[in-house]
Amino acid sequence: MLGTLAKWLRILGFDTEYAKGMDDTDILNKAENEGRILITRDRELHGRAIKRKIPAMYLSNADLKEDLSEVLKEHPPDPDLSMSRCTVCNAPIEEIEREDARGKVPEGVFERQERFWRCPKCGRYYWEGSHWENMRVFLASLK
């Protein structure tokens, strides 16, 4: 229900689990056991979390910008937007030597970029390409 929001929170460096396919009880248990904040559009799930004293946010919007603005108002990110989490699997990513990215990223990207990161869990590679500036513009539009 909030997969795109989860991806953006990871981009901002938040340790963000996405509970796809889990039932409500498992979601609540996971949030409680791992000390997580539950973010949901499910009013009933939100109410159950509050009753169990699990920190929770209920989002009533269906708009990414509004949702992200609301979350960031309550939980401001580190002001330095930097690569720290895999947007797909949430694992912390690691900066790698530039040469280690050769042959693993498109050749043009390798020629234009100086810094690369790799997810040790799923193997994805990251770099600060033109999409990075687009993300900065999007995030600036939230303020």
Image (tube, grey):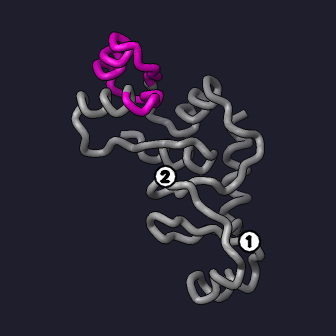
Q: Residue at x 77, y 76 (%)?
A: 114
On screen, residue 14 above or below 59: below
Indicate which disc residue 66 carries.
none
Question: What range is drawn magenta here?
Answer: 33-58
The percent coordinates of residue 32 (x first, y second) are 38, 26
Q: From the image, tell me which residue sits under label 2.
A: 90
Q: Residue at x 76, y 80 (%)?
A: 112
Considering the image in quadrants, where does the N terminus appear? top left
Q: Is residue 25 left or right of residue 76?
A: left
Q: Residue at x 42, y 33 (%)?
A: 34
The percent coordinates of residue 76 (x first, y second) are 67, 31
Where disc 1 sits, the SS reads loop
On screen, residue 83 above or below 50: below
The percent coordinates of residue 33 (x first, y second) are 37, 30
Q: From the image, tell me which residue sits under label 1.
A: 115
Q: Residue at x 63, y 54 (%)?
A: 84
Residue 53 belongs to magenta span:
yes
Q: Amino acid at mark 2?
A: Asn
